[in-house]
Amino acid sequence: MSELMQFLMSGVTVGAVYALVALGFTIIYNASDVVNFAQGEFVMLGGMITTFAHLAGLPLPLAALIAIAATAAVGVALDKLAIEPARGAPVVSLIIITIGASIFIRGVAQLVFDKQLHRFPAFTGDAPIALLGATILPQSLWMLAGAIAVFIGLWAFFTRTLTGRAVLATSNNRLAAQLVGINVKWVMTLSFALSAAIGALAGVLATPVTNTSYDIGIALALKGFAAAMLGGMGNPKGALVGGILLGLIEALTAGYVSSVYKDAAAFVVILVVLFAMPQGLFGSKTTDRV
Amino acid sequence: MTTKRATLLILAAIVIVSPFFFPSNYYYRVGSLIFVNALAVTGIVILTGYAGQVSLGHAGFAGIGGYACALAPVHLGLHPGLAALFGAALSGGVAWLVGRPILRLRGYYLAVASLGLGILVAMVLANEAWLTRGPDGIEVPDLGLNDALEAIGIDIRNTQFWYFFSGLVMVVGAWIALNLHDSPTGRALRALHGSEIAARVVGIDVARLKLRAFVISAVYASLAGSLLALQNKFITPDVAGFMHSIEMVTMAVLGGAGSVLGAFLGAAILTTLPQVLTVFQEYEQILLGLVMMLVMIFMREGLLPSLARRVRGREK
């Protein structure tokens, strides 16, 4: 029983990271229909920049802030330099552009930083907390709290602020949004900045537990996508629930089946969702505009 | 002369004429690598250029094809040549199974699912050491064709044999792809590339055709993986790695994903580059990433079709 409890807790912890990646996906997808394969690189940048800024002598909170701001800037650059010039390009081209961006960012990270595994100290120590017959790291609580805080923040942003509603309007109908005076280019840029910042935050929260290195991005993108699909593409609630669920599935696979193949769980989830319920848990059925 | 015949003639001429300019045996080796890559990329042309789908896991099929040549002769007693066909059938089967649920849907689903599939295949090859001997790789039995040629009096060096053999397979692969382009299937594929809804309206079974393109392209990648394994007489799980998948897509995109000759050009450029630039290794990811972004933003059709259009424009 306590064994199961332990698996569930580690599942929820990594699930929080997947949820954050999936939320980042959702923001860009909603604003622009672009599936951003570079989403995982934002997480990598968040962790790596914090690590190296901290090594350079900066206090951890400042290093984390710098990392989040710098990653948001990378997100803006991605939108301005690669996505905006390709406006109106078919899905195939957009996939290739964002996967190209992903490879490019990871190549640069490998040169600027290094190929080693890195971590920095947990925010509030490494002493495990006993809970319901299992133990959980304080950092895991930070990760969970981070995912929930981002979710609530986004919910408030999208429903309570004018800017947030402008993003929703743009995702609903770009042309109509433009007609009522919404600056859709700005909305796009904002979405990329926000999404990159959330990705970087995930990296900052997770690195003390999961470690980071230049090449973690693509696997995270795959898992974030699986989580988003499980929850229903484009739905923030789905992203949160899908992320936690995927984390649980992965932890149970690692615990009861094989720790080597826990990474295969994301792939199996994608296939099962596509087979059984392509709309995901919370997704609505989509129709095509001709 | 039709584009089809011109393409085949150009490819055949390249295979036959290039050796006259080779200063050393090493060039046969590079040439043969180019042909093997061009074969895999021809499969990507069918999938991406004709049908408008992206796969980020095609190296997984190359891995299946390569390891089939290493394992099937030992465990199933198959001749290495038959093992390559066995691998191709296996790759096609896997592509069919995975592609069936995915290709009912549009857009990015195949890219994501194939990414997962590729990672999974590489993972299995590296971890099931009892079968594949793990990350260090495994030796591959000799195809035996070279010895057979020697027996009938044709004495040819091993590297030269593989150069011409890979060249032959590449030209046959190009011929099949070009025939497909002009067949009803090819026309239907290009129609759905333009607009899936429009294609469906005129009665095209979109899901089945996309699936067919995916399966065919998987077979191409698998055969390329087999050719590579057979000529190296050795294979490692790297052949199924994520970066190899990315290389294939970049080659297709750079040369021109819609054109078989473009596939060759892209494969030739990106295979030769690391041989010429020794620093390439260090910057490989940056360069591949840049190429993908720049080509998609500035010349979406790729190098060859863009150049061809410019030349034609000047003639007018």
Image (spheres, rainbow, N blue to C red):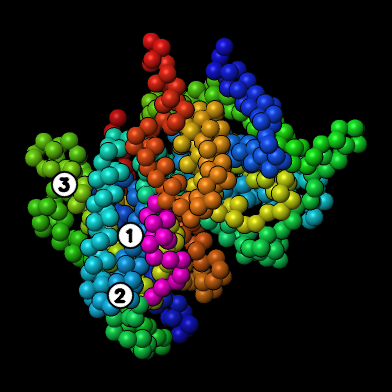
Are the residues under marks 2 and 1 on the same chain? yes
Dot 2 falls on a residue whose secondary structure is: loop
Which amino acid, mark 1? Phe
Would residue A261 be found to the left or right of residue B295 on screen? Answer: right
Would residue B98 be found to the left or right of residue B285 on screen? Answer: right
Q: Residues within 10 Å of mark 3 (few under 14, many from 20)?
A: few
Q: Residues within 10 Å of mark 1 (few under 14, many from 20)?
A: many
Question: Could you tell me how far apart the alpha carbons at marks 1 and 3 are, in whole angstroms?
Answer: 20 Å
Give the x, y percent position of residue B114. Answer: 50, 48
The structure residue drawn at horizontal position 49% and vertical position 25%, both measured from the top left corner, is B188
Question: Could you tell me how far apart the alpha carbons at marks 3 and 2 are, in whole angstroms?
Answer: 34 Å
In the rendered image, the quadrant that contains the N terminus of chain B is top right
- What chain does mark 1 sit on? A
Q: Which comes before the other along the chain, label 3 or label 2?
A: 2
Q: Which residue is mark 3?
A: A186
Depth check: A84 or B109 in front? A84
Q: Nearer the viewer, mark 2 or mark 1?
A: 2
Q: Which residue is mark 1?
A: A42
Give the x, y percent position of residue A193. Answer: 23, 55
Magenta residue check for B179: no
